[in-house]
Image (cartoon, rainbow, N blue to C red):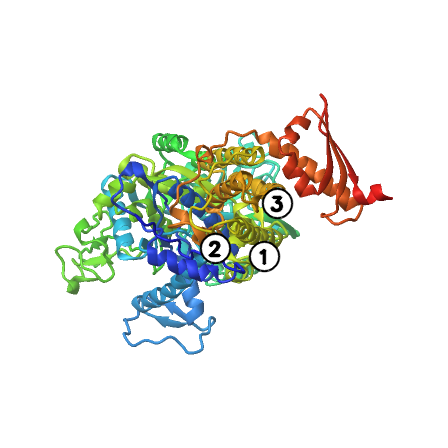
Amino acid sequence: MTQEPPRHATVPERPSLDGLEPVWVSRWEAEGTYRFDRAKTREQVYSIDTPPPTVSGALHVGHVFSYTHTDTIARFQRMRGREVFYPMGWDDNGLPTERRVQNHFGVRCDPSLPYDPGFLPPDKPDAKRQVPVSRRNFIELCERLTKEDEKAFEELWRHLGLSVDWSLTYATIDGASRAASQRAFLRNLARGEAYVAEGPTLWDVTFRTAVAQAELEDREWPGAFHRVRFGGVPGTAYAEGVHIETTRPELIPACVALVAHPDDERYQPLFGKTVRTPLFGVHVPVLAHRLAERDKGSGIAMICTFGDVTDVVWWRELDLPTRPVIGWDGRMLAEPPESVPAGTYAELAGRTTHSARERIVEMLRESGEIEGEPRKISRPVKFYEKGDRPLEIVTTRQWYVRNGGRDAGLRQALLERGGELRWHPPHMRVRYENWVRGLAGDWLISRQRFFGVPIPVWYPLDSEGEPIHDAPIVPPESVLPVDPASDVPPGYAEEQRGKPFGFAADPDVMDTWATSSLSPQIVSGWERDDDLYRRVFPMDLRPQAHEIIRTWLFASVVRAHLESGVLPWREAAISGWILDPDRKKMSKSKGNVVTPMGLLREYGSDAVRYWAAGGRPGTDTAFDTGQIKVGRRLAIKILNASKFVLGLGDAGPDADADGEVTEALDRSMLARLATVVEEATAAFESYEYTRALEAAERFFWEFCDDYLELVKARAYGADAGALSARAALRRALQVMLRLFAPFLPFVTEEVWSWWRQGSVHRASWPSAGELDAAGDPEVLAAVSEVLREIRKAKSSARLSMRAEVARLAVGGAAAETVRRAKDDLCAAGTVGEFVLEPGDGELSVSVTLAAVAAE
């Protein structure tokens, strides 16, 4: 039977890296090289829960960094004989997309407006004068822009060489994802794991939405301590007043108590007494609590509802009343809270918190209830990770999913799940455990936004048209996905929307993590494709960055545990951050990102992948074009070395490759390569892809610098020694191409196509056994060391490497080992007389150059 010829069947006269990407991307797609075969059993499949990148602009080089790590693992597993399920998703709902749409089109969403089917965005968008549009119009613009971004993202990923099956794509806002997200929510609700509660909520006043604990970050923020006097307590040392120091005097009308540490002797006479708030004269109690800091300010603080998260703890544990003064827009409410005089409060109503702070300080000076000048400080303040203004705490009604924050039993179960998961690197498990143990509440999943998965709930209305929140109406799973804002609940008609005894839709959408956390279920066909689900779930690998262990990884564990009682995957491979030259994390918000397409085109995708693969699991890595250049040199050397090897003798697909390897040096080289195969295999099995690359690269340069030079003269011959050399060279080349294939897919595929059938990426991963490596690995090592000494002597004498060596003396215990390849050594070093001086010591080399001897 005639074998299929290789795809080029010839070695190019001048091989080049330029233009390889479009050629092979097109060929891989046409030939279905990475297409998933769903006929395989679960034991034969390796499934990857690929991170869906946020579709809100351009990818940056940090994405290339981490996604390359995953791709090396996918390619290795495919070559090991596993059928790799490797889909790609797009995370296209949530605040980043909305913000991008607002700025790109110059619009803002106003849900009160009717849908305009003929709406066109402004020709010249103005981000400061945004045009109001209906929710449906706004969502259409979101979908339009994300489609454009997704095409650009896919083009870049293909150019990078990700071995994704591009027929397996999804978006977190598509129908299947919305249905899965809503189904999981409804089941959480039915089991009592999802619930609604009203209370203090961290709130971003720019986006006007709630923010979950996992989305917080502390940033240094300027402020000032103001020393303010509360009304005194007769008969105590504080008859003239009690001084507190606060950075937020505008919250004095929200004050519900003063608090000091129970062991603070200074304030024990005040515990149980009341004092009057400055300006407003509201009586508030003085209480004791362990969280009060004796050495901070005056040691006594005011509790306001709400100034920070500690206020929330005090409010809850001390059972205090609520006096909210800040609205969802970040301004002071128009009306004062109960018990606060309206006349004085009117000076603050409607102001921003900054303006209110300035005005209340003026009022305190006028009343004499402030002492001295404000003392400037810098302090950590809570921010939404994507926001640019400090968070406020407002009272809202929100949806939550239980995650162990208020349930010790569930928390312990989730800690045990983290222990079942195999972490790469192992120490990343500590981040997971620290997060779970430090949870302060359940998972807040509702958001007051528009482009997201709607909460699938309606509420019946009473006779006054007010919603009955404790009797939600839910849809059957068979009709999912639904949009309560436009769909009608079972048993109602559209005409009853918003009418007494009718219904109203829950206005919120789910946090993007509430959908992304179900990515293993979504891509596996949960409740949609049972056959696929059985073949790929639970999945094998979750690759992701370390900073979202607390969000994506933990939330995914929560969802799979609650729904199926299992981990969603067996392994977690954690990538580090990509850092700029100043060792700062690259991010769009910092403006220090590098966009990758220019790099890919300038240096080639293999070169960029080489740099990325040098970042060890979980380790932050600096962006370095120097390493990218090293990667390009490596790829070029693979082309040139392969051309040399295949230019020896017959260039047919199997010429010489299966010939007998008889010479000591050739057998030694193959023996050394066998150990490299074992090392690289063990590294990949431990998800240490960087170590696998290092092993392959280290051998390759030794192969080129030493072995090729040593064997070159012999390989051109026609005797048994030449046949041995050519067989060894081609056998080694086959193996090295496969070792490099996960890292440098384009150059390895190009060379493979010159003389082999099929794709190198569907070839089997090399094994030490196929090298028939019964040689002594020390032969190549010893002879290479002698050759280096010869080169060193010629270089020191400023002579050509072709200069003759009159006499070469080799001594020590390794001298006999060198003798076994002396003919190759003498040919490579142009050696005249070769002298052995056996002994027991270390290898010794004496080089007498012909030019020196002639003098």
Closer to the camera in the image, 552 or 472:
552
Would residue 792 be found to the left or right of residue 519 on screen? right
Q: Name the residue under label 1.
A: 361
The correct choice, above or below, for 110 with respect to 642 in the image is below
The extreme top residue here reads: 840
Q: How far apart are marks 2 and 3 (CA)?
A: 64 Å
Q: How crowded is mark 1: few (under 14 residues within 10 Å), some or many (20 or more)?
A: some
Classify the position of the C terminus by image quarter: top right
Q: Name the residue under label 2.
A: 386
The amino acid beneath tag 2 is Lys
The answer to whether residue 594 is visible is yes
Labels 3 and 1 touching (C-beta < 8 A): no
The amino acid beneath tag 1 is Val
Would residue 309 be found to the left or right of residue 366 on screen? left
Closer to the camera in the image, 128 or 600:
600
Would residue 355 be found to the left or right of residue 798 on screen? left
Closer to the camera in the image, 564 or 806:
806
The correct choice, above or below, for 460 with respect to 132 in the image is above
Disc 3 or 1, which lies upstream in sequence?
Answer: 1
The correct choice, above or below, for 768 with respect to 542 in the image is above
Q: In which quarter of the image is residue 366?
A: bottom right
Q: Mark 3 points at which residue?
A: 713
Q: Position of residue 316 (x, y in %)?
A: 41, 39
Instruction: Nearest to the eye among marks 1 and 2: give it.
Output: 2
Q: Position of residue 33 (x, y in %)?
A: 35, 52
